[in-house]
Amino acid sequence: MSLWVDKYRPKNLGSLSYHGTITQNLQALARSGDFPHLLIYGPSGAGKKTRIYATLNEIFGSQVEKLKIDVKTFVTSSNRKLEFNVLSSAYHLEITPSDMGNNDRVVIQDLLKDIASIEQVDFNNQSSSKTKHRFKVVIINEADSLSRDAQAALRRTMEKYSSNIRLILVCNSISNIIPPIKSRTLLIRIPSPSTEEISSILSHVARKESVKFSSTNEAEINKFLGTLADNSNRNLRKALLSFETVAMQNETIALNNSSLSIINLDWEVLIRNLSVTIRQNRNVATLAKVRVTMYELLSHCIPARTILKTLLFNLLELFTQQTLIEELVDLGSVFDERLSLGQKSIFHLEGFVAKAMVAIDNALS
Amino acid sequence: MASILMQKSQQADQYEKERLEHTPWVEKYRPKNLDDVAAQDHAVKVLKKTIESANLPHMLFYGPPGTGKTSTILALSKQLYGPNLYKSRVLELNASDERGISIVRQKIKNFARLTVSNPTKDDLENYPCPPYKIIILDEADSMTNDAQSALRRTIENYSSVTRFCLICNYITRIIDPLASRCSKFRFKSLNNDNALNRLKYIAEEEHINLNRNEPVLEEVLKISGGDLRKAITFLQSATKLNNSLKGAQDLEDEDVQMLGEEGETNADGTITISSVREIAGVISDSVINEIAEVIKAKDHKRIITEINEIILQGWSAQQVLDQLHDKFILDDQINSLAKNGIAKTLFTVDKRLNNGTDEHVQLLDLCLQVAKIL
């Protein structure tokens, strides 16, 4: 039994439910059998991957769904051996070079040049398009965390081997992609779906799975699904997952019970409580308590930057004074920079909390 | 037998043709000789003189990207040697090749000290074929300082048989001893007329269907900011997308028997300003105006929701930054003092973004700070 997220993932371009014009463009590209290098960006849970696979499916046929995992080994310049996972089908490969940290340049240089220098032979073309596919597709995940070196190595490869290889870069934001790469790719932006779009998908799933609600009133159900979508920050994947959780926990979903539509993760609750504590008691004793919580969060592998961001936005909700909001955001951005430059994240998190306490103190008194 | 050979050659032709379709236009329309190089009159004039006298200094080309540095040196070396001799006389290295100190010591040195190969009689008649080789180091500013200092002596030692050409964007990244060994050529960014002529030429050659009512090519140039390579790539992406859209349209049209009316959709195969902007990732004016208005209204809660929306739409913070910059700095209603403050805020946020910080927090900070200044 698979998760609803996977079960109801659209398999081809025709069954995609929102962003009509993007689908139209992709369909046109797929029909011509050829496409330029693509750079697909958008927030998480917007459906980037789903669209890529749907496009590949359209071009190559269902063969692309037969995936296998290979382990490749590389030797770095300092003679260290590295292992690297490659997800591949007959027509494409999927890699996440940022797994390799600083050695991602080696992967880009070796692996891509390897693939790119072999021409793809297309014997049994199952799809309807007439053109032969001389190229192999390489999907590069998390392209925004590629190092500058790796990106620089990519630029010449993209031009030189453009007849044998097509790259699809996937990332959340194009700010960290160097301009030469941007100017060599076709940019496709995939925005988050709107609340209505998410709730219509959720209600479709609910009907298919015959989820029971406490009332059959359409409007009430829609309202419930709407809040669910809002709380997931318009992340479709998160919305579907939390909907499934709710449906699993309750046999019939009580629509008037508003707490059901908000699935809170433990760490989010912790951070929310933290922000309330900071507002109430601004003293050194609280700071010591905060440290314990921070360490606990960090030891559960919550990224420091996520903690900072969540804490900041929780704090912003608690206050209304304009100057205070300005100051808090400014502090947040300063410590965000320090986090990404520094090593020991607990210092900066505590620093932020201490500064925020002072700022709140000044504003309230 | 002959027919088989014919078939073979036909296949080869077909193959070449398909390959040519896949080559980027930037490569396809690279200038073949010095006369084709757009807008760099000064450099071209000096280099032409050197062809006549067949003597070449070591050279250092610098200037912003897409101004024709690589194209110029490639065209020059083609004119000097002709296609046959080119392979044995020119070594081209760029950032995708390993270029550490070991390569400088081995590969470059070995090539530099080779004696020059003898040109054939044919080549001698058609080309100057001067008695030295050329080593082109593209993107030289990404070479490490160690590798650059290893080059110093090599350049001098083998200057009788080898000329170096360094190409870079920032001359400050080249160490002084290297820079002083070369004669420098500055490539200024292209002015609009020249670049526009080139784009028009390409558009004609490729039979691009441009929307006649809008200055599309001018817009392409404006977006790319003087970078001709960028402009050409945008043009190609736009054409590819629109052609496939058009193909799709045609298929559907056949089914409905062509009603004989112009389609009002964007998908009728012409390239419009809006389609170019979408490809370049440029945010539409209405969105930017909305942000600017929200900032001017100084309602912090509204700013927070607006920025949240922008992030969810997937726009890049860097792009928002660029366009807000244009918007505010060119706004006549803001006094110079406020502009100063805004520019400083923009600078700080830009720096932070470059350090790999969170876009959402930074963008929010930017907007709140600007609102405070206004």
Image: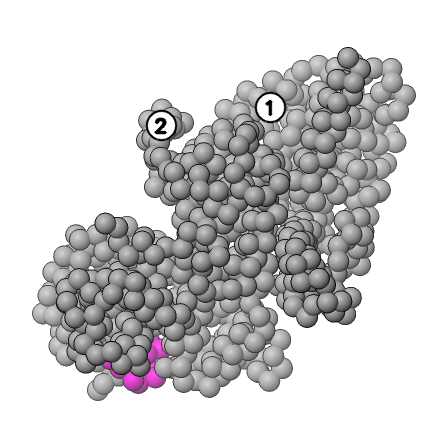
Badge 1: few (under 14), some or many (20 or more) residues near its Cα, within 10 Å? some
Q: Is residue B120 left or right of residue A179?
A: right
To which residue does mark 2 refer?
Answer: A73
> In the structure shown, which secondary structural element does the residue marked by tag 2 occupy?
strand
Residue A290 locus on image (x, y percent): 14, 65
**Mark 2 on the same chain as mark 1:** no
Judge whether residue A326 is colored magenta.
yes
What's the residue type where badge 2 is placed?
Answer: Thr
The answer for which chain carries disc 1 is B
Q: Residue at the location (82% across, 43% down)?
A: B36
User: Considering only vertical position in the picture, is B64 above or below A73?
Assistant: below
Location of residue B337 by image quarter: bottom right
User: Considering only vertical position in the picture, is A49 above or below B5?
Assistant: below
Comparing A124 with A241, the one in front is A124
Q: Is residue A72 left or right of residue A23?
A: left
Its colouring scheme is: one colour
To which residue does mark 1 refer?
Answer: B108
Cα distance in 3D space between marks 2 and 1: 30 Å
User: Considering only vertical position in the picture, is B137 above or below A235?
Assistant: above
Judge whether residue A272 is colored magenta.
no
Q: Residue at the location (24% across, 78% down)?
A: A216
Residue B292 locus on image (x, y percent): 51, 78
Question: Does residue B103 appear in this view?
Answer: yes
In the image, which residues are magenta? A316-328
Residue B356 locus on image (x, y percent): 40, 55
